[in-house]
Amino acid sequence: MSTIAQVNNLDKNTINSIIGVIDKRDVNCKSEIERAKMDFKFQEIFYYIEPEGYLDSDSKRHHPYLNTLLKKRGIEFCESPETEFALYYIGDDVESYPAITNCYYKASNELLNLKYGRNFTKDIEKTADSMYVMSRIDNPFQYPAGVDHYCIVYPKTKDFLDQKLQIQQDFFSTFKYPIGFIYSTDKKNFMARTKFTIQRDNTICNIEIDLEFKNSENQKFYNYLVNQLTAFIKNANWNAAVSSEIKVNSIFTVNFYN
């Protein structure tokens, strides 16, 4: 019974707007939408609204290209000064209602979509990001920060988070310690920190290996382990990373230890 009452109350208190469903009681949002409509008649502006939560360091990498593309259409580019919140309520202990942040800036962007096409703002951002990627296509991108989210470069695993674990398992499944190797009682025999470039054609180059032994007497096997690791990395099946859906060179790191 209470659920039905809540649904009816929600329907009664909501209206459709250019930015989607809003609460009737959110008078600030309604007035901001109307103000955006008035301002749009005199000046067209695309507003970048920073999403709520963590952003990677490259989230604004395409902005110079976006600014150029927008200017060709006579559209200004600005960043919203308002913090974005997905869940935001106004009211008191007796009654509260969901409010929306960035109403003015969201409305301005939706007006651009109405004028230039349904997905205009998304498409022009995507184009700008592709331009950025192509402008530095020969320079390696950092993995995973500089490539598309959840991009998998080790296709043997289907889960982004399991890649490095699978790489380690595959290496040690065929690795054999050399005769005379002194084993540690806690099985932490060595740590190998590796860094290499996965190229656009799925090949590997620029392999760097930093190798440390638990027992210093095993240092004489340094070249043996480096050669084993190098051979595994070069011969494993890799997929090039993609950034803005474009194949790119990427710098990948993985540690090997047991």
Image: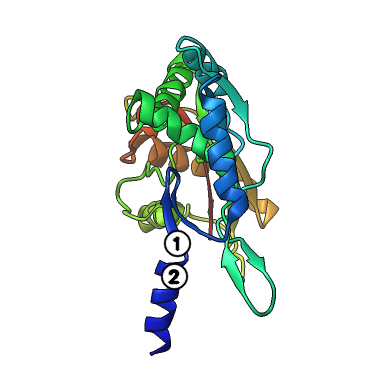
Q: Residue at x 43, y 43 (%)?
A: 18
For residue 241, side relative to residue 98 (left or right): left
> At label 2, which amino acid type do we have?
Leu
Residue behind mark 1: 14
Query: Residue farthest to the bottom?
Result: 1
The quadrant of the image that shows the N terminus is: bottom left
Q: How many marks?
A: 2
Residue behind mark 2: 10
Q: Residue at x 62, y 36 (%)?
A: 57
Residue 247 image position (x, y, % from top left): 36, 27
Residue 136 image position (x, y, % from top left): 49, 16
Alpha-carbon neighbours of circle 1 within 10 Å: few (<14), some, or many (≥20)?
some
For residue 128, side relative to residue 64 (left or right): left
The numbered disc on residue 190 is: none
Q: Assess whether mark 1 and mark 2 are in contact (beta carbons under 8 angstroms).
A: yes
Does dot 1 land on a helix, a strand or a loop? strand
Q: CA distance from mark 2 to mark 1?
A: 6 Å
Q: Nearer the viewer, residue 4 or 12?
A: 12
Q: Nearer the viewer, residue 44 or 26?
A: 26
Q: Does residue 53 show up?
A: no
Residue 8 image position (x, y, % from top left): 39, 75
Q: Residue at x 52, y 39 (%)?
A: 106
Q: Nearer the viewer, residue 223 or 69?
A: 69
Residue 176 image position (x, y, % from top left): 42, 55
Alpha-carbon neighbours of circle 2 within 10 Å: few (<14), some, or many (≥20)?
few
- Is 13 rendered above or below residue 223? below
- Is 182 rendered above or below residue 102? below
Does dot 2 land on a helix, a strand or a loop? helix
Q: Does residue 29 show up?
A: yes
> At label 1, which amino acid type do we have?
Thr
Q: Residue at x 55, y 19 (%)?
A: 42
Name the image quarter holding residue 97. Answer: bottom right
